[in-house]
Image (tube, rainbow, N blue to C red):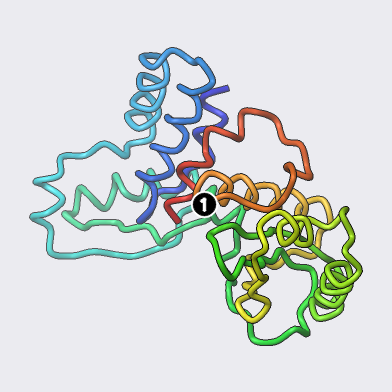
Amino acid sequence: MLYRAYNLCDPGEERQEEIDLLKYAFINQNFPPKEVIKTIQAYDEHDGFVENNDRAKERTESIVVPYVKGVSEKLRKELAKEDVNLVFKKGRTLHSMIFNGKYKKNDGRKKDLIYKIPCQDCKLCYIGETAQWYDEREKQHTRCVRNQDDNNALFRHIKETGHSIAWERVEFLEFEQRTYCRKMKESFFIDMYAAKDGVMNPRDGTQKDTCWNAIIPILNKF
């Protein structure tokens, strides 16, 4: 199992962060730390990623290529014999598989997204997801607040605290067309913001396996 999960790592700029993430996750799931470290080291040595750093620094020639598992390791070994460094482009990481990094809000005509609505007076925020155009979804929220709908988390926060909602500071956190993936990503964001400043959401809408809890502190670093 450790070997299969470790294969998710791609050599590149963030490879060490990927290794640390996997190490952290497995140890938090009660895998013996020595076994985790031994597996990682064995994989590195088997695929030829461990190399004398001083020798690599002395080389003046470098080639940058995309990483292709099973081919890149052999190519690196052969080029090292010719004193040429082989550098791998940044590949897909666990973080990029979860979040695509499109965090800009230009207008309300966006859909299939995860959004964040902050409070005007405190650090709490509401995390939601919608397949609708966001401006239509926002109208639904404001209508619930106006109608004093106790099923709406935004209204409950206003009712309990007397605070205001900062509608003008809404952020689009992520875009995702696939319904299940969008709900899972919403769940990750709820966990991440709950761990930082707190959320208005009453609970995590999409239930995840507890093994995912191990990576929340690492995702927060991004």
**What residue is drawn where x is 83% and y is 68%?**
145
> Which quadrant of the figure contains the C terminus?
bottom left
Q: Nearer the viewer, residue 185 or 160?
A: 160
- Asked if 156 appears above or below 18 in the picture, the reply is below
**What residue is drawn where x is 51% and y is 26%?**
3
Q: Nearer the viewer, residue 155 or 63?
A: 155
Image location (x, y in percent) of residue 86: 29, 56
In the image, what residue type sits under mark 1? Answer: Asp
Q: Nearer the viewer, residue 18 or 137?
A: 137
Secondary structure under badge 1?
Answer: loop
Image location (x, y in percent) of residue 10: 46, 48
Numbered marks: total: 1
Q: Quadrant of residue 113?
A: bottom right
Q: In the drawing, does residue 177 fall left or right of residue 101?
A: right
> Which quadrant of the figure contains the N terminus?
top right
Q: In the drawing, does residue 91 fall left or right of residue 155?
A: left
**What residue is drawn where x is 70% and y is 68%?**
175
**What residue is drawn where x is 81% and y is 59%?**
178
- Asked if 175 appears above or below 27 in the picture, the reply is below
Residue hosting label 1: 197
Q: Quadrant of residue 100?
A: bottom right
Crowd band around label 1 with a 10 angstrom C-alpha radius: few (<14), some (14–19), many (20+): few
- Asked if 185 appears above or below 23 in the picture, the reply is below
Image location (x, y in percent) of residue 140: 88, 72
Image location (x, y in percent) of residue 119: 61, 66
Q: In the drawing, does residue 44 fall left or right of residue 7?
A: left
- Asked if 157 appears above or below 132 in the picture, the reply is above
Q: Nearer the viewer, residue 109 or 89?
A: 109
Q: In the drawing, does residue 150 fall left or right of residue 31?
A: right
